[in-house]
Amino acid sequence: MIPRYTLPEMSRIWSERHKLEVWKEVETLVVEAWVEQGVAPAEAAAAVRTAPEVDPDAWKAREEVTNHDVAAFVDELADSVTMGGEWVHYGLTSSDMLDTGQGYILKEAAQLLHRRLADLFVVVRAKAVAHRDTVMIGRTHGIWAEPTTFGLKLATWAFELDRDRTRLEAATASVAVGKISGAVGTYAHTPPAIEAYVCDRLELGVEPASSQITHRDRHAEFLSTVALIGASLERFATEIRHLQRSEVGEVRESFGSGQKGSSAMPHKRNPIASENVTGLARLLRSYASTGFENVALWHERDISHSSAERVALPDACLVLDFALVRMTKLIENLVVDEKRMLQNLETTRGLVFSQAVLLALIEEQGMTRDEAYRIVQRNAMRAWDEGLPLQSLLESDADVKLEAGPLDRCFSTAHFLRNSGVVFDRLDQIDA
């Protein structure tokens, strides 16, 4: 991933240096497991444990000779061991180290993503609670619908983020596995005790039947979850973009001192962070597609998945990490124009209260639903076309015989929001 969308913590997790450190840890644990089995001498495990980390440049230079990255790593590590280098990679095949190491790195990356999700959840929930009574127009199909609050809108985001956390936890458990079962996964040269030792110390699950690799449905599930979290962020970003449109103007991204919105038009304040997140979500969906393509491999394994996931797995984690941090800052500093929200509500001339009148005519006057609907619709269309207040039109309609009190209640936002507190009661039950 390009530096523009790369943050330091996730970058370190996916760095080549860290990958080689994890590979060395896997190889070291395997030797220690052989010692525990009474096969390798204890001195060999100690020598591998204290050996220097494999230098990335030396590893790449050796790969120029071997044309095999794992073989080059094993050669470099074995050569650096003061004694017992012959026990490095003993009984293993490449995928034992590769997939176990990758399972560990994916676990680290997922843990960071989970923290980012938790941070965003806290910010969104706090903003929702702060604006639980900030009345605004609810819109469906982009058209005025009924009154809601900005807090209720944000509450739907908070619940979705909590579901994303649950999905990520499940996907992490699925992908954070290792295997030390040898060529074609038969344990012919490494007893299951070696695998159990290594995976236990790395706090990884065990692939129960590996066929030489950990199966890529796991990675597809992880990438799908990452893409789904990205889709959540895109939903939030899209809403912010719509609400920031000049004609709406109900929220806007913060605008820093000295910031420029356009190279040509000095008046511009654009929703650039939201648009950025929208674009990154598209990338995440493409990585999920790659994950699905990687599931079907030939026989016990091939490496058609390898080149694709060397890009897709780190990049997906880096992109989502960046997007989560950006969205967290966006929501934390979001400017909410409560006055404009009320102005826009008043602009509807009471049209958004039409359903309340419909139900009152049924309940108070005993009309059929269709009769009541036609009366309200007739007046609503006049309100649309002639720019007149709906309540005034209804008050002068001979077919409407509602008392002033019941009719006034129909045009009260409190009437529409009287039960909305239950959403915040439910939101309060979720652990941060």
Image (cartoon, helix red, strand yellow):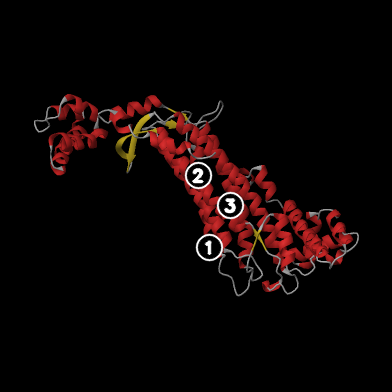
Kindly identify the amino acid type of the residue bearing the numbered disc 1: Phe
Mark number displayed over residue 162: 2
Q: Is residue 330 above or below residue 95?
A: above
Res 63 visible = yes
The CA distance from mark 2 to mark 1 is 25 Å
Neighbour class for label 2 at 10 Å: few (<14), some, many (≥20)? some
Res 280 visible = no
**Residue sitting nearer the eye, 288 or 132:** 132
Q: Is residue 54 above or below residue 34?
A: above
Q: Mark 2 or mark 1, which is nearer to you?
A: 2
Q: Is residue 398 left or right of residue 44?
A: left
The CA distance from mark 3 to mark 2 is 20 Å
Q: Indicate the secondary structure of the residue bearing disc 2.
A: helix
Residue 427 position within the rendered picture, expressed as x and y whole percent measured from the top left: 46, 38
Q: Indicate the secondary structure of the residue bearing disc 3.
A: helix
Residue 397 position within the rendered picture, expressed as x and y whole percent measured from the top left: 11, 30
Q: Mark 3 or mark 2, which is nearer to you?
A: 2
- Residue for badge 1: 292
Q: Residue at x 74, y 70 (%)?
A: 191
Q: Is residue 227 above or below residue 247?
A: below
- Residue for badge 3: 316
Neighbour class for label 3 at 10 Å: few (<14), some, many (≥20)? many
